[in-house]
């Protein structure tokens, strides 16, 4: 009966939305429509342009052919606003709409060197002005991405408000938002063209394994804060969305080649076109990139009988990646499109883990997607696959190399390998519509299904015990309603209901009140609940003796921790989803068409937040630390032992720590000094106010793992020197903080960096030269070094020393290399 009741509410909610969708259009006889085509000054069509009837909720977005339609507009005379990123907004006054008729309004927009505001999609899963979005969101458009150098979109994320940007290599980065980071952070959801882009075998974002070359990116959106109401689990702290270019909107060819320090080389290309009189579009993309990454040498625990730390062996810091893909698009009548796309990548390099580092060898990622889009409907089915190739653990190899001196290197690598295969099979349907009879009320609703299959080839997950792949099912339904209460006030409500076959069902509600006293000036108060489901690592890890006498065990059943006398000294409950209730007060506005301001204050209440990987039992602990302890499975009562079936283990796992409260502020400003010069700035302040952990939980398990203060400030210069030259610079500051995740324990010192970019249009048509220099000038508050060997109980040694200089290196992640100056020069050709 309780489970039956739990299904009643979502069923009623879905029925209500379906009822609204069926409202008859009898009142449309007294309404009309506005339609037309949006073009630029060169008469090229402009897809993705937002058209709004000023003072109402009636709006539309142009399709790939540049055509838009706004239906259900009551008869009358209106002002119509047209806006697109990178172009000058335009207001057309006195547009007359007659009942039962269509008003044709074709508009041409002029380009501007630098723009304010724009249109976003991620906040509400539909197009809306950024000032209307009920969340903290940043969009990086195709032009800004085009001006970066190299293979990756990642450097553009440095200036996103609210983001912890962590550079761990020449091309490798990690991102987080609003606290509780880890070496294996998965609190931010990554999306690619509406599909979930995570590695199911560990829950990490796809990141550098993406199949999308930079030249095919149409935009990046970063939503900071809880996103579960529309996106479900894994969106606890935010959503990072990549969208690719449509063949009809971006036809032609692009080729880019770049090189730089540390043997960096990258070449990538894209070609797109139309067939069958424009009804069929196609594109193909490809890229190859390589670099000699920054390096450092870790040491691991001694291997008996030696008491000396074990040096890291065979680490190969040469990184490379190949990626590419293609798409076929059928443009259907009624502004609909059907697309089949796919891609693949293969990468080599080094990746950090909670227990050491992995040597990535031929790691592959693939995706295949079929999707249907329409102004009111969206549907997709897709599958992704990740394969670890010949990846192996550097920490295990280094110790096994000493432990088994008579084996060949290949045999020791096989003994230390990290095999994995993860597959996602998913489907989604979504509908968006406007109820004209209710003053333009807008509704978005949909449902998702996801099935994961994960295998460690019977080595380091629970499939080692069961002999069967780890499979999970997740189902979710969601809806959002945008209600215009009066002309200046909107109420936004959303909810999502998720069922996971390993955990209790979860509700993720969302509510916001938005007040817009004048156009492009919006104040909001919002509430969001998000949850984070444990990944397969957190519930399904099973790796005894990953290092001699040390084992990592997932927390599906809970643990009993017993002392040498057999008495239970601590009980650890099975891990379950953490919850995050966040309240926000925000303002977004464009002032005098010269200043864009986005500021949000928030308070987040975490319940049962999940710890990083942590020691829960230590059979060699001295009496001063409580004496020896041993871990037992709470469900079966079986003791966790080594791979030989008898030896004791220092046990590490994940668990729910307790409750925490975080208060913070995210701010972003952009001021147009002139149409070609802008000053930009972002700042984030966050503070862990209170934390309540259970009795027996170590204080270290509550590590916040994030800076309390960070900011960026810089300037952009566009179309200078006869419109041929552009440039920008950025100063970045990150306050030092303590970091603890598995064996990664230490302080990340305070640092500041200075970056600049420049671009020049060459006399050859469609050709430009781009220069990027990162970390040219650096100030650092100190350095850190290994304390004997890397271990959870051995914090790195911190040497506090304030230094500034050109080419100075700094640390952004514990136990990873110091990052130095990076300079890249590239040439780009568009035709």
Image: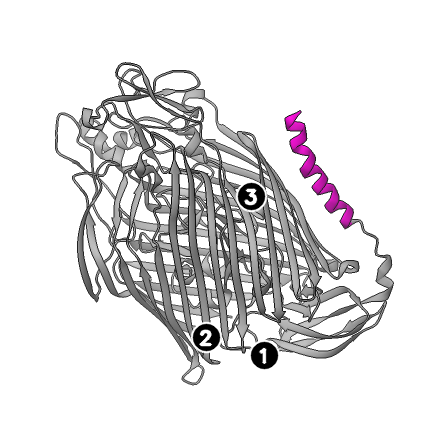
Measured in 3D between alpha carbons, the distance from the residue under mark 1 to the one under mark 2, in whole angstroms, is: 20 Å
Q: On the picture, is 414 further left or further right than 436?
A: left
Q: Residues within 10 Å of mark 2 (few under 14, many from 20)?
A: many
- Seen from the viewer's position, the closer of residues 538 and 193 is 538
- Residue with the mark numbered 3: 232
Instruction: Say if residue 477 shows up in the picture.
Output: yes
- Which tag, 3 or 1, sits closer to the chain's start? 1
How crowded pointer 3 is (Cα within 10 Å; few <14, some 14-19, many 20+) is rated as many
Task: Please say if the residues under marks 3 and 1 sit with CB atoms less than 8 Å apart.
Answer: no
Q: Which mark is residue 753?
A: none
Q: Which mark is residue 110?
A: 1
**Residue 363 is drawn in which quadrant?**
top left
Foreground pick, 742 / 663 = 663
Label 2 SS: strand
Q: Does label 1 or label 2 sit earlier along the sequence?
A: 1
N-terminal of the pair, mark 3 or mark 2, is 3
Count of numbered circles in the view: 3
Q: Circle 3 — which element? A: loop
What's the magenta region? 1-21
Most common SS among magenta residues: helix
Q: Which residue is mark 2?
A: 671
Indicate the position of residue 442 as horizontal and vertical percent values. 70, 56
Report if residue 815 is visible in the image: no
Residue 364 location in percent, x, y? 43, 43
């Amino acid at each position: 009966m309780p489970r039956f009741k739990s299904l009643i509410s979502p069923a009623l909610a879905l029925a209500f939305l379906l009822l609204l969708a069926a409202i008859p259009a009898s009142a449309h006889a007294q309404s009309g429509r506005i339609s037309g085509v949006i073009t630029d000054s060169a008469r090229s069509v402009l897809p993705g342009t937002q058209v709004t009837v000023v003072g109402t909720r009636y709006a539309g977005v142009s399709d790939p052919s540049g055509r838009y339609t706004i239906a259900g507009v009551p008869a009358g005379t209106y002002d119509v606003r047209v806006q697109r990123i990178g172009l000058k907004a335009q207001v057309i006054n006195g547009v007359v709409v007659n009942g039962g008729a269509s008003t044709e309004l074709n508009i041409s927009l002029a380009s501007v060197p630098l723009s304010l505001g724009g249109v976003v999609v991620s906040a509400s899963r539909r197009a809306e002005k950024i000032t209307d979005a009920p969340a903290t969101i940043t969009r990086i458009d195709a032009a800004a991405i085009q001006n970066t150098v190299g293979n990756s979109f990642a450097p553009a994320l440095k200036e996103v408000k609210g983001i912890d940007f962590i550079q761990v290599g020449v091309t490798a980065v990690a991102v987080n938002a609003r606290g509780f980071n880890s070496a294996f952070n998965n609190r931010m959801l990554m999306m690619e063209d509406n599909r979930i882009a995570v590695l199911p075998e560990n829950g990490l974002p796809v990141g550098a394994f993406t199949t999308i070359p930079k030249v095919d990116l149409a935009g990046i959106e970063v939503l900071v804060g809880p996103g579960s109401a529309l996106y479900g689990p894994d969106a606890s702290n935010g959503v990072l969305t990549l969208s690719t270019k449509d063949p009809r909107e971006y036809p032609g060819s692009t080729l880019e080649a770049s090189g730089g320090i540390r043997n960096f080389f990258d070449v990538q290309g894209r070609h797109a076109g139309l067939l069958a009189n424009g009804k069929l579009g196609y594109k193909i993309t490809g890229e190859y990139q390589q670099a000699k990454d920054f390096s450092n040498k870790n040491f691991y625990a001694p291997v008996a009988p030696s008491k000396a730390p074990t040096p890291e062996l065979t680490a190969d810091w040469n990184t490379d990646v190949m990626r590419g893909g293609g798409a076929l698009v059928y443009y259907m009548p009624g502004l609909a499109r059907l697309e089949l796309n796919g891609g693949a990548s293969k990468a080599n390099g080094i990746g950090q883990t909670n227990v050491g580092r992995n040597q990535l060898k031929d790691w592959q990622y693939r995706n295949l997607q079929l999707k249907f889009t329409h102004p009111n409907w969206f549907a997709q089915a897709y599958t992704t696959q990740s394969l670890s190739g010949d990846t192996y653990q550097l920490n295990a190899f280094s110790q096994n190399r000493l432990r088994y001196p008579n084996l060949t290197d290949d045999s020791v690598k096989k003994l230390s390998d990290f095999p994995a295969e993860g597959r996602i099979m998913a489907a989604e349907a979504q509908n968006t519509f406007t109820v004209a009879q209710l003053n333009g009320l807008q509704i978005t609703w949909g449902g998702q299904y996801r099935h994961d299959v994960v295998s460690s080839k019977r080595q380091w997950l629970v499939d080692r015990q069961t002999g069967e792949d780890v499979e999970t099912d997740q189902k979710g339904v969601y809806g959002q309603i945008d209600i215009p209460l009066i002309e200046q006030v909107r109420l936004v409500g959303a909810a999502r209901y998720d069922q996971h076959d390993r955990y209790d069902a979860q509700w993720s509600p969302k509510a916001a009140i938005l007040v817009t006293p004048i156009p492009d000036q919006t104040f909001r108060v919002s509430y969001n609940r998000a949850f984070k489901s444990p990944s397969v690592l957190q519930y399904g890890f099973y790796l005894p003796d990953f290092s001699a006498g040390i084992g990592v065990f997932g927390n599906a059943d809970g643990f009993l921790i017993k002392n040498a006398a057999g008495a239970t000294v601590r009980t650890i409950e099975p891990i379950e989803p953490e919850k995050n209730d966040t309240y926000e007060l925000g303002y977004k506005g464009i002032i005098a068409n010269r200043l864009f301001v986005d500021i949000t204050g928030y308070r987040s209440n975490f319940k049962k937040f999940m710890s990083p990987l942590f020691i829960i039992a230590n059979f060699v602990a001295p009496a001063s630390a409580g004496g020896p302890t041993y871990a037992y499975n709470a469900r079966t009562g079986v003791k966790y032992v080594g791979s030989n079936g008898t030896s004791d283990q220092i046990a590490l796992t994940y668990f729910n720590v307790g409750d925490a409260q975080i208060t913070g502020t995210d701010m972003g400003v952009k001021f147009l000094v002139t149409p070609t010069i802008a000053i930009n700035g972002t700042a984030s302040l966050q503070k862990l106010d209170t934390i309540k952990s259970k009795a027996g939980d170590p204080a270290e398990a509550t590590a916040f793992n994030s800076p309390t203060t960070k900011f960026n400030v810089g300037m952009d210069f566009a179309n200078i020197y006869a419109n041929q030259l552009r440039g920008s610079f950025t100063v970045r500051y990150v306050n030092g903080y303590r970091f603890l995740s598995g064996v990664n324990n230490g302080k990340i010192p305070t640092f500041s960096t200075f970056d600049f970019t420049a671009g020049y249009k060459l006399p050859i048509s469609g050709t430009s030269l781009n220069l990027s220099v990162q970390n040219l000038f650096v100030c650092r508050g100190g350095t850190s070094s290994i304390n004997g060997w890397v271990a959870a109980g051995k914090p790195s040694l911190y040497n506090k020393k304030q230094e500034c200089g050109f080419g100075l290196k700094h640390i952004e992640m514990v136990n990873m290399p110091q990052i130095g100056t990076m300079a890249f020069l590239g040439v780009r050709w568009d035709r």
